[in-house]
Amino acid sequence: MLAKKKISQVKCKRCGRCCVVFDEKNNSWKDCPYLVRYFDGTTFCIIYRHRVGAIVGKNQICKKRVQIKYNYPGCPYNSRYDLHPAYKKD
Ligand code: SF4
Ligand code: SF4
């Protein structure tokens, strides 16, 4: 279990692209309120240890990345699923 966790942390590039919530007011996607962005392009979750199950937006909870079936640009966890709606081009 510990070995698996270490591998997951190495895989993640900390781009933050999977940390998006839907903004109903503006009908668009925005950063999760718990996401911090740095000038070097990396990000950090300020509730990382307690993130799973946390309410991050209306009708939206944080899940482990492996539980999310969408793809995100450049994410090592991507598989055969569709690109997340936040990154789909019209
Ligand atoms: S999209 Fe992928 S690489 Fe980027 S933060 Fe999420 S899990 Fe990490
Ligand atoms: S709570 Fe979840 S969605 Fe929000 S920044 Fe942390 S990991 Fe990303």
Image (spheres, grey):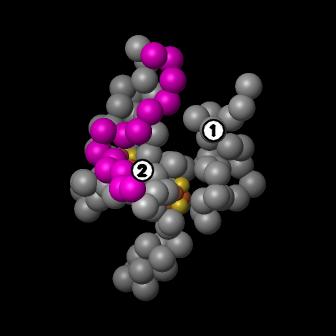
User: Callout 1 environment at 10 Å: few (<14), some (14 to 19), or many (20+)?
Assistant: few
Give the residue drawn at x 44%, y 46%: 19
Considering depth in this image, is 12 or 64 the residue closer to the camera?
Answer: 12
**Discs 1/2, front:** 1
Above/below status of 60 relative to 26: below
- Residue for badge 2: 63
Considering depth in this image, is 10 or 69 the residue closer to the camera?
Answer: 10
Judged from the image, the secondary structure of the residue bearing numbered disc 1 is helix
Give the residue drawn at x 46%, y 57%: 41
Magenta highlight on residue 31: yes
Cβ of mark 1 under 8 A from ligand 1: no
Above/below status of 13 relative to 35: below
Specify whether residue 20 is in view: yes
Give the residue drawn at x 62%, y 34%: 85
Above/below status of 11 relative to 45: below
- Residue for badge 1: 87
Q: Which residues are magenta?
A: 26-39
Number of residue marks: 2
Q: Quadrant of residue 31?
A: top left
- Type of residue at label 1? Tyr
Residue 29 image offset from top left, x and y in percent: 49, 30
Q: Quadrant of residue 25?
A: top left
Residue 2 image offset from top left, x and y in percent: 37, 82
Cβ of mark 2 under 8 A from ligand 2: yes
Q: Is residue 80 left or right of residue 54?
A: right
Q: Seen from this angle, which residue lies furthest top? A: 25
Judged from the image, the secondary structure of the residue bearing numbered disc 2 is loop
